[in-house]
Amino acid sequence: MRSTMTGTVQVIECPDSMRELVRAAQSNGRRVGLVPTMGALHEGHLSLVRASTTECDVTAVTIFVNPSQFGANEDLDQYPRSLENDLAALESLAVEWVFAPQTAQMYGPGFSTWISPPEIAATLEGESRPGHFRGVCTIVLKLFQILPADIVYFGQKDYQQSQVIRAMARDLDLPIEVSVQPTVRESDGLALSSRNQYLNGADRQRALGLSRALQAAAAAVADGERSPQAVEQLMLSELRNAGVDEVEYAAVADAQTLAPVQNIDRPCVALIAARVGQTRLIDNRLFE
Ligand code: PAF
């Protein structure tokens, strides 16, 4: 099993070796931070890494494109893979360990145990991408077993995912703190995503429709709009104006449960999933 040093980062493939390193650090009183990723790292991931290196003594980043969270017609084969660049980016950030297993190490022969995701996974992404959260919960729980860290860092960009993981950690008494960090955006508002690499110039321009629709929604709520239907219509019309026609959802939901609300009279979140050209993008915004 490979375990190599590239510069200051140790790259580990073997789950048992990885677990031993984490346990040894913790038995020396060191707090371990975990940043799970599928690689193709961008500033959004690096902001999670920075949060971890600030709050923890040791940081582990996982890089694994998890096949079980992709649907049959999704972009598993095209998903960007750039391990060497990722390692170079992590070198400069005082990351100790990168856990980068092979698929066969995570899904060995006869693998057949799956997590049934919490209720909060049933809606939105759960409806648009059947089986997605089953794959996410299963791999994340496996990662928690291999890297029994003190804190795990997720991005608000995948809002529902972070709430699903929180619910799973609560329901299964997982001894890990889940920290959710703000979405990182380009200066024009586009939320950073590994899938932005797929966007050509015109599509990238249209993709701004998502953050603009969310911005318009937040402004309307700040101005006193309390009807979720009105805010959803506003987002749809902003998306249409930007040339984003294939909207999977543009919804307002309770920020805790993601259930629909009658009135925006509690912390709520607006969430959008849309296709821009061939690229599926998601974004969200909390109304405090
Ligand atoms: O957010 C992601 O990149 C993935 O869903 C995760 C959490 C690394 C699980 O594969």
Image: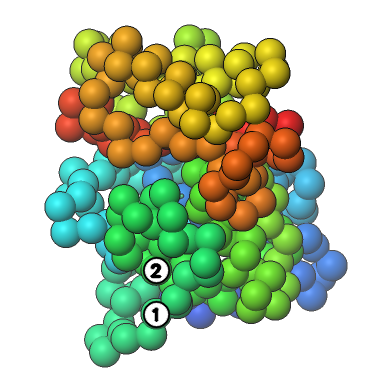
Q: Which residue is mark 2?
A: 134
| Residue 114 appears in the picture as rendered | yes
Q: Is residue 153 left or right of residue 116?
A: right
Q: Secondary structure at mark 1?
A: loop
Residue 253 in percent (x, y) is at 56, 43
Q: CA distance from mark 2 to mark 1?
A: 7 Å
* Image position of 126 (left or right of 277): right
Residue that appears at 35% across and 55% down? 127
Dot placed on the residue nearer the N-terminal end, 2 or 1: 1
Residue 68, horizontal then vertical, whole percent? 30, 65
Q: Is residue 21 above or below residue 285?
A: below
Q: Quadrant of residue 228?
A: top right
Image position of 277 with respect to 240: above or below: below
**Residue at x-position 16% and y-position 59%:** 72
Determine the residue positioned at 77% across, 53% down.
Answer: 57
Image quadrant occupied by the C terminus: top right
Circles 2 and 1 in contact, beta carbons < 8 Å: yes
Foreground of the two, 90 or 267? 267
Q: Amino acid at mark 2?
A: Arg
Compared with 199, 178 (above or below) is below
Q: Does the numbered disc 1 mark a residue whose Cβ is under 8 Å from ligand 1?
A: no
125 relative to 275 in the view: left or right: right
Give x and y (percent) for residue 216.
Answer: 53, 15
Q: Nearer the viewer, residue 212 or 9?
A: 212
The residue nearer to you, when weighing 203 against 49, is 203
- Identify the image quadrant of the N terminus: bottom left
Q: Alpha-carbon neighbours of circle 1 within 10 Å: few (<14), some, or many (≥20)? A: few
The one nearer the camera, 115 or 29, is 115
Q: How is the image coloured?
A: rainbow
Question: Tag 2, which secondary structure?
Answer: helix
Label of residue 114 in the image: 1
